[in-house]
Amino acid sequence: MKNVKIHDKEFELFITYEKIRSIVEEMSEKMNNDFKDKNPLFLCILNGSFMFAAEIFKRISLLDAEISFIKLASYSGTHTTGSVKQLIGLNEDLTGRTVIVLEDIVDSGITIVNTIEQIKAKNPADIKIATLLLKPDALQVKVQLDYIGLEIPNDFIVGYGLDYDGRGRNLIDIYKVTEKK
Ligand code: 5GP
Ligand code: MG
């Protein structure tokens, strides 16, 4: 599919699943190497990251690896609201653990900074951040990202777990909004 319509907006094919898969393969291979002697806890930020997190985690060959989930929401429609709501919290004991946050996309950076603060309060040994996508031009805060799949322009995207008001998460590829001028 080259074009899709979701709610009131048109989207065009932007990043193919083939490209995503090669990013995921490269990133997970690096992680297998980087966390060899740890028992890392992967932390998926729901909802948007579920597909990315599943695809990373199934390629992690370390038998000591674990995964858990937190649920945050900052987006409404096609724009960030600037405030982050925690919908499902973090119950794990993180003391002394290496935590790898799996995020679908870093936009303003507010979600990820907020998440890092919550994790830090639980005294992990180390926190690493992995994001499939980054919009460098949208960043409003300073944040260290340890694994970045792909940098993209400041356009609204859907697919591969990312939604537009609940829809579009099941698209295999990633689409970007088509601006009609
Ligand atoms: P931030 O707090 O960095 O501004 O936004 C991060 C969250 O907003 C991401 O985890 C993602 O769920 C959502 N988000 C940011 N940009 C987009 C986008 O272009 N499309 C969709 N569907 N969600 C986005
Ligand atoms: Mg997200």
Image (cartoon, helix red, strand yellow):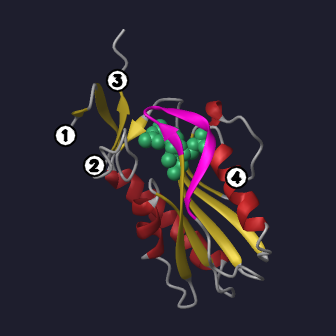
First-in-chain label (1 vs 3): 1
- Give residue 4's position: percent from left, percent from top: 23, 34
Type of residue at label 4? Asn
Image quarter of residue 158: top left
Q: Is residue 61 left or right of residue 167?
A: right
Type of residue at label 2? Leu
Residue farthest top in this picture = 181
Judged from the image, the secondary structure of the residue bearing numbered disc 2 is loop
Residue farthest left in this picture = 1
First-in-chain label (4 vs 2): 4
| Residue 84 is inside the magenta segment | yes
Say which of 34 and 179 sits in front: 179
Nearest to viewer (mark 1 / mark 3) = 3
**Residue at the spot of label 2:** 171
First-in-chain label (1 vs 4): 1
**Residue at the spot of label 3:** 178
Type of residue at label 1? Met
| Residue 38 is inside the magenta segment | no
From this viewpoint, is residue 69 visible?
yes
First-in-chain label (3 vs 2): 2
Tell me the tag on residue 114: 4
**Residue at the spot of label 1:** 1
First-in-chain label (2 vs 1): 1
